[in-house]
């Protein structure tokens, strides 16, 4: 456990807490976290997760824009549900991304857990896009992913990061409940 991992974990907790509270500052704070975790995952040979952090950096800007200037009134998006076709399309993209990235990592790198890392990374991108769009289903996907990330990080002896993702799982449960309540308050 390095000082960098400790600081990144603390920043991660703040970022996810702000996301649950729908505070747009979650995005720039999250950007700091993903930059730090990019290095941590490179060092741990979790290359899919390292690449994921780079894409997350771009999604942090997208989320910031969506939450502050997106939506019909350009005043920020509101919590909503995905359609069944939107849900299916997102999960299909995650599955295809997992297959492609897993193959590349297993074939061309010395990745520590190529298929597991790739699958979690691909579906995390789906969850992150849904979060930026304030789709309530993002939290259900995060609950599953964060739980599986705990196992991966324990396997890689990144114990603080595993604990962080355990906390992320609890925050995702809280986020699901909170966003469901907020969605019920939005007129149809």
Image (cartoon, rainbow, N blue to C red):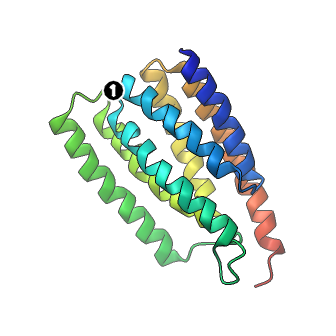
Q: As rendered, which of 188 and 34 lies closer to the eye?
A: 34
Tag 1 residue: 45
Q: Is residue 94 above or below residue 120?
A: below
Quarter in which the N terminus is drawn: top right
Q: Residue 176, image x and y in percent?
A: 70, 55
Q: The residue tagged with tag 1: helix, strand or loop?
A: loop
Q: Is residue 101 above or below residue 46?
A: below
Q: Is residue 22 above or below residue 77?
A: above
Q: Residues within 10 Å of mark 1 (few under 14, many from 20)?
A: some
Q: Residue 36, image x and y in percent?
A: 51, 32
- Say if residue 135 shows up in the picture: no
The structure residue drawn at horizontal position 44% and vertical position 70%, both measured from the top left corner, is 88
Left-right relation of 42 to 101 = right
Q: Residue 162, image x and y in percent?
A: 55, 27
Q: As rendered, which of 64 and 79 lies closer to the eye?
A: 64
Quarter in which the C terminus is drawn: bottom right
The structure residue drawn at horizontal position 53% and vertical position 15%, both measured from the top left corner, is 2
Left-right relation of 102 to 166 = left
The structure residue drawn at horizontal position 72% and vertical position 75%, both measured from the top left corner, is 75
């Amino acid at each position: 456990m390095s000082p960098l991992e400790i600081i990144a974990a603390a920043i991660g907790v703040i970022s996810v807490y702000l996301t649950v509270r729908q505070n747009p500052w979650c995005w720039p704070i999250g950007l700091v976290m993903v930059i730090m975790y990019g290095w941590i995952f490179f060092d741990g040979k979790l290359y899919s997760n390292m690449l994921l952090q780079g894409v997350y950096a771009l999604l942090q800007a997208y989320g910031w824009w969506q939450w502050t200037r997106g939506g019909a009134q350009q005043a920020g998006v509101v919590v909503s549900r995905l359609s069944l076709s939107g849900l299916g399309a997102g999960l299909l993209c995650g599955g295809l991304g997992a297959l492609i990235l897993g193959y590349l990592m297993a074939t061309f790198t010395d990745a520590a857990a190529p298929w597991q890392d790739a699958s979690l990374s691909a579906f995390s991108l789906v969850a992150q896009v849904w979060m930026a769009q304030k789709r309530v289903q993002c939290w259900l996907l995060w609950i599953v992913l964060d739980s599986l990330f705990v196992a991966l990080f324990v396997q890689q002896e990144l114990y603080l990061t595993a604990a962080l993702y355990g906390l992320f799982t609890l925050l995702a449960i809280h986020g699901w409940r909170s966003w469901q309540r907020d969605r019920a308050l939005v007129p149809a």
